[in-house]
Image (cartoon, rainbow, N blue to C red):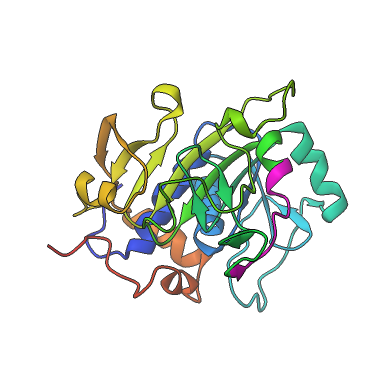
Amino acid sequence: MTNATDFSLAELVIVAAAEAWRGDGEMLATGIGPLPRIAAGLAKLTFAPGLMLTDGEAYTVEEPIPLGPRGDHPLMPSGWMPYSRIFDSVWSGRRHAMVTPVQVDRFAQANISALGDFRKPKVQMLGVRGFPGNSVCHKNSMFLPNHSKRTFPEAEVDVVASVGHNPSRWPLNANRKPVDIGIVVTNLCVFDYNGPNHAAQVLSLHPGVTFEEVQAQTGFPLLRGPNMHVSAAPSEEQLAIIRHLDPSQIRASVIKGNPPGQKAA
């Protein structure tokens, strides 16, 4: 495959995010938000044929459903998955979601609930919703479009909506379950929590971004991953799939200003 020379940061992020599902085998892949949704479809169509996808409503599909108006696009579902049936996959662990929290901390705990004091928040959002159960039942990766010290705070997230690697958050004598955190993809880099003692380590830097820049925008210490590299540019083949999965170019609205994939000097 030949790499493209003209691509957006959103398209670079989609390619990086698709790697979350590499090696998963037969799994329900759920991408929350436009870029994770496209990334799951890209993974399915390129290197992860065992993935089952959702159509964003109540069906499971083998063929990814493009974002935006469906028009005459035929829906050929493989199964029916209303809210009550999703738990069969969630509780069995046969699901890998890429979620879109507003805060993630050094423990990999995530927040979608509120900002500020929980008793009188500055911003009220969704509430914890399915984050607690999902985080103890199946693997979760994350996407945050604006990498900053507000999204990756020095202290804990304002509301712990999903379980991470903080032992103090588990009730005394609780039967602690292993927490399976995949990758975290942002507009600056890709990292995971597989460093010593679950430390965050940078796996790849997006083109033109330095490790020092990423650390300056992160409230907690980061490690350089042992094989830290530059995030791969999309290939022409991958871009063609991305355009097919997002004909309305919804991806262009996700990262502020829709910047190019190569950061300007």
Residue 132 on the magenta segment:
yes
Residue displayed at 62% across by 78% down:
69
Task: Write the start and end of the magenta stretch as one range.
Answer: 123-133
Q: Is residue 200 left or right of residue 66?
A: left
Relative image position of residue 7 (x, y in whole percent): 29, 64
On screen, 185 above or below 179? below
Q: Would you identify the image quadrant in which residue 82 lies?
A: bottom right
Q: Is residue 202 left or right of residue 54?
A: left
Front-lying residue, 110 or 256: 110
Relative image position of residue 218 (x, y in whole percent): 34, 49
Residue displayed at 37% across by 55% down:
149
Residue displayed at 26% across by 35% down:
228
Relative image position of residue 189 (x, y in whole percent): 33, 48
Residue 28 on the magenta segment:
no
On screen, 223 above or below 121? above
Residue 47 in sight in this render: no
- Residue furthest right as drawn: 84
